[in-house]
Amino acid sequence: MKRINEYKKLFNVEQDTDLKKLKTTYRNLVKEWHPDKFQAGDERAQEAEIKSRQIIDAYHFLVSIAQETKEANLGDYEITTSESGIADFQHKGLLLEISFLDGTTYEYFGVSRNVFTKFVNSDKQFRFAKRNIFNSFLYRKSKKTLEVA
């Protein structure tokens, strides 16, 4: 959640913002902080390099959690969370990362230690996740489906 708040603060956006506004803000920030804008010896050149990477990361992250992105990928998400089993999971802080048997991985934000403990101790983890995690927490697809050669 801290990461989300930092990125929203950087882009100066509200809870739900549309992709068009996000893209416009991204372009303006990149123009302002592009490393080529500064001379090689300038002390702000190094700062611009770091800031531009942060802007790019923030943009991709905010696009991945935007409502329009979620709506576009809702069909695939529903299939994954209803038909594919859980292959692996990790919990760190308030972030729960679940890898599914179909090769996709989703990150769920704001999952407390208490909810995670109940998930781990559940007899049927997939059923618990369907009822208490999949549609209850902010999520994003973090890794693409692995393609089998």
Image (tube, rainbow, N blue to C red):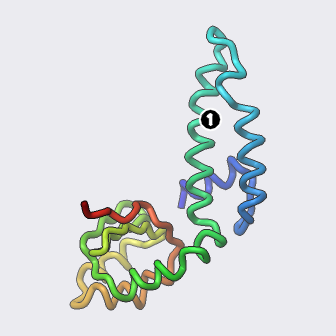
Split into 4 quadrants, where in the image is the C terminus? bottom left
Q: Is residue 102 above or below residue 47?
A: below
Is 48 on the left or on the right of 74, as rendered?
Answer: right
User: Percent x, y for residue 85?
Assistant: 28, 82
Is 50 on the left or on the right of 141, as rendered?
Answer: right
- Image point (59%, 27%), residue name: 49
User: Percent x, y for residue 22?
Assistant: 72, 56
User: Percent x, y for residue 84?
Assistant: 32, 82
Q: Is residue 64 above or below residue 28?
A: below
- Image point (54%, 54%), residue name: 3
Callout 1 secondary element: helix
Other residues around mark 1 within 10 Å, as few (<14) / some (14–19) / many (≥20): some
Q: Could you say which is closer to the camera, residue 147 or residue 69?
A: 147
Q: Which corner quadrant of the image does residue 107 belong to?
A: bottom left
Q: Which corner quadrant of the image does residue 32 belong to?
A: top right
- Image point (72%, 52%), residue name: 23
In the rendered image, the residue lying farthest to the top is: 41
Q: Is residue 134 above or below residue 64?
A: below
Is 99 on the left or on the right of 23, as rendered?
Answer: left
User: Percent x, y for residue 148?
Assistant: 26, 64
Q: Could you say which is closer to the camera, residue 112 or residue 128?
A: 128
Residue hosting label 1: 52
Query: Number of numbered discs present?
Result: 1
- Image point (63%, 8%), residue name: 41
